Image: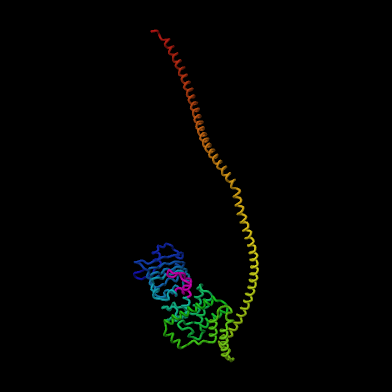
Amino acid sequence: MAADGAPLTEEDVRERVNLQHQNLADVRSLSLPGTYHEKITHLGNSLKHFINLKSLDLSRNALTVLEGLQHLTCLEKLNLYFNCISSLSEVFRLHSLMTLKDVDLRLNPVVKNESDYRLFVVHMLPNLRQLDNRPVRDSERKASLLHFTTDHAYELKNSSVIPKGTETGRCIQPRAEYINSMSRKCSVMDEDDESVLNLIAKCEWDLRNPLGVTGSTKRDPAVEFHNLSRTCKMEDNPGRCRKLETQFAALQKLKQENLSKEPHRATQVTKKVLYEATPIDHLLDLVDKYWNGYRSLHCNKAFLSQAEAVLSAIQKSVPTDQQKDSPLHQELNNLLLEKKVLQAQLSEQAEKYSAKINSLVSELDSTKKDMDVLRQHLDRLLEENAVLKAYHSKAEQNGQNAAQPKIIELQNQNQLLTNTNLNLEQRLQHFDKMQELTAMLQESHRTLVSTNQHLLQELDETHSRHKAEVEQLHWNYAQLKKITDTLPSS
């Protein structure tokens, strides 16, 4: 596998991991790290039947292509540490593995050679949670979406892996449908972020052009951002306004970076097309300049005077019926309709707020009254508490003065009782000793009685034996006498 560069086979996999199991679909984890003498250069179809594999370790091998991993549709963890993957086109082969959560491509040439490598992988795998032993942050997902919706998106050397609708031989621009589908797969964005990204994809904003220069006849994203800012301010939503301003500043910064990378092209485009501010833009600029919260523009004389001038200019610029069908007139009509709708909504909200405020005021008044009653009750309780404390201290003092002689007498009696108790304890101890001695004497007496009885019994037995022996001797003597009497005198 290392010497001749032959593809890895299923038999090689079985031999390397000593796998005796016949049904390869049951395997969940597989480890094939390279060694000093043996490294994998090509996977081939060796993993075709490991369809339910969830973890795969191919670290420290010599893989240059990732062909053969497309069958592992259930794969969640892939370790390609220290291999020879050198192009994003090979990394793009992982785009079908939508269940991948952990990928490690450290010490591969693609990590060093491709500046957009991490953003590309994060954009390609929406369910990725960890890349190169680092967690994937929400900010990286948003940056990848912003980055790959421009026309300087990812560049793939192999045209076979480029999404449909792109061109080869240059930096490609993914289709709006492809971008929207990728943005929908990333669930980390909220509603405002999705609206901004959809706006960029819809307008096909060229980030290499300066602000206000679109390079096409489609709507200017700067105007769209002004419209979004105006809408959120009229809806009294400062949080959304701040978010839009932050995103717009980030896009401005990205454009500045792109301009610094391609200054010659940017100057040419700037010379061709210059942004001409329309009265609507002036009006929106005034709103951005003077708006400072809910109904802050209603009493601002500077804003009202300048807004009247701008509106009069708009009216003068559309005097004829031929211009009534112009985009500006239509936009103005739309703005007026939106204004009426928003005013109706504001009036409804104002009525709701006034009703809520009235109810809250009445509740506050009743609460204040209750607080006053409770405060008076608390004052009375505090006064009673002070009187009771004084009475208690006097009672304690009088009780101590009256009970002092009794206490002395009780102490003397206690001392006498203590002495008596000690004497009784000593006597009790002496009595206990006497009882022990009595018990010992009784035990000794019982022992002596039993010994005496035993001795008497032995004496009776000895006496009976002696009596029997004496009778035997008398009988023997009588027999001997008879025998001697029968003997002759000689």
Give the percent coordinates (x, y) of residue 481: 43, 12
State the image quarter where residue 22 is shown: bottom left
**Residue 120 placement: quadrant:** bottom left
Q: Is residue 138 magenta?
A: yes
**Residue at point 44%, 65% (across, down):** 29
Query: Is residue 286 shown left or right of residue 364?
Result: left
Q: Is residue 197 visible?
A: no
Magenta-highlighted residues: 120-142
In which quadrant is the N terminus drawn? bottom left
Vertical relation: 115 (above or below) 397: below
Position of residue 369 measured from the top left corner of the image (x, y, whole percent):
65, 67
In depth, the one of 468 and 165 nearer the eye is 468
**Residue 430: in sight, yes or no?**
yes
Classify the position of the C terminus by image quarter. top left
Type of colouring: rainbow
Residue 279: image x %, image y %?
Answer: 54, 87
Q: How many marks?
A: 0
- Left or right, 264 with reference to 382: left
Q: Nearer the viewer, residue 480 or 8?
A: 480
Confirm whether the magenta stretch covers residue 160: no
| Residue 6: percent from left, percent from top | 37, 70
**Camera-side residue: 173 or 193?**
193
